[in-house]
Structure formats: C-alpha cells, structure tokens
Amino acid sequence: MATRLFASAEADPSMRAIANEAGVGIATLYRHFPTREALVDAVYQDQVSRLTAGAHELLAQFAPPTALRRWMDLFGNWIATKNGMLGTLLAMVESGEIAHAHTRTELLGAIDDILEAGRASGELRVDVPAADISAALIGIFTVASSPEHDALAARLLDLLMDGLRAPASAAS
C-alpha cells in the first residue's frame, strides 16, 4: 500500500505540491483523496455548496436585486477558480464521476430562490427563468474569462441586471 501511495505521488507532482501547500504529508493527502480526481471532486462539491449557501446568505442581507448581482460576482469567482482544473473537471463530468445534472440543479435552485424573492417584492421580472440567467452568466464569463477582462465582466453583469429588474410600473 505504501509503495502504491509513493508511486502515485511520484506520478502526480501536483498532488505533492497540494500536500506541501496544505502542510500535510503526501500519504495523508492520499489517505483522504486516493486520486487527483477524488480531490478535485471534493473541492468542486464544497465550492458548489458554498456558492448555493452564498445565495441564501446574500438574500438574508440584501434586497433581491442586490443579492442577485452580488451572487453573480460569486459565480464569476467560482468560474475563475476552475481555470486550473478545467481539463480534469470536464473529463470527470464526461465520465460521470461528477454529477453535472445535480450541480446544475443546485445552482439553478440558488438563482431561482433569489428570483422568487425578487418577484414577490416586485423588484425582478417574473418572466425570466433561472436557466436563462445561468446561460447568460456562462456567456459573460466565457467572453470575460481573465482578470484583464474584469471591467468588461462587471459591465456585462450590470447590463444583465438592468434587464432583470421589473418595469417601474410592476415595482410600484
């Protein structure tokens, strides 16, 4: 077993770097995450949970339009953190190791919770489904996917939010 762990650690220097960064030994890392994919999956699921919880936390603190706009920034940060592991994530989704449908349902649920609160308050449009917002966000962060495009992403997100606000007559 120790030989397999050592051989695996030698085969994947990124796992050794992660262990060093975390301040643990490589055997400790492999004991909890026997493969790089297991580690990626654990990080991914944790981030999805944090992102969905973030929607509820923002909604508890802010009016629905502000909560939604701030959540869009959280989503952008979440997408940005995937840059280094995008290839692994895509391969894992393709192989079924990550339940993409479950993640999508969780994220759409988070968006929908904010939308429902905004609809109830009359601040957000009633005719826009969460899936449309998700698609728009993916489009925005595909076009503005690097730090030098942060201003572009912010502008596009603000434009999206302007389009999501309920008409003035509906809000009054």
Image: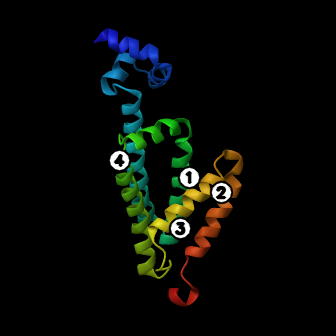
Q: Which mark is residue 153?
A: 2
The front one of 159 and 143 is 143
Tell which circle, 1 or 4, labels the residue nearer the N-terminal end: 1
Rendered position, 106 above or below 63: above
Distance from Cα at disc 1 to Cα at disc 4: 21 Å
Disc number lying in front (1 or 4):
4
Q: Quadrant of residue 167?
A: bottom right
Name the kind of residue labelled 2 in the image. Answer: Ala
N-terminal label among 2 and 4? 4
Question: Which residue type does callout 1 highlight?
Answer: Gly
Q: Quadrant of residue 4?
A: top left
Residue 48, horizontal then vertical, whole percent: 41, 49
Q: In the displayed structure, would residue 163 be above or below residue 106?
A: below
Residues under numbered marks 3 and 1 in contact, where contact means CB atoms less than 8 Å apart? no
x, y percentage for residue 58? 45, 61
Give left or right: position of 150 versus 66.
Answer: right
* The N terminus: image quadrant: top left
* Secondary structure type for disc 2: helix
The amino acid marked with disc number 4 is Ala
Q: Which residue corresponds to mark 1?
A: 76
Can residue 139 be seen by looking at this rendering? yes
Instruction: Give me the disc on residue 99.
Output: 4
Nearest the camera: 161 or 13?
A: 13
Secondary structure beneath dot 4 equals loop
Q: Nearer the viewer, residue 137 or 65?
A: 137
- 3 vs 4, front mark: 4
Residue 66: assigned label: 3
Displayed quadrant of residue 118? bottom left
Q: Position of residue 30 (x, y in %)?
A: 35, 22
Q: CA distance from mark 2 to mark 4?
A: 28 Å
Identify the secondary structure beneath mark 1. Answer: helix
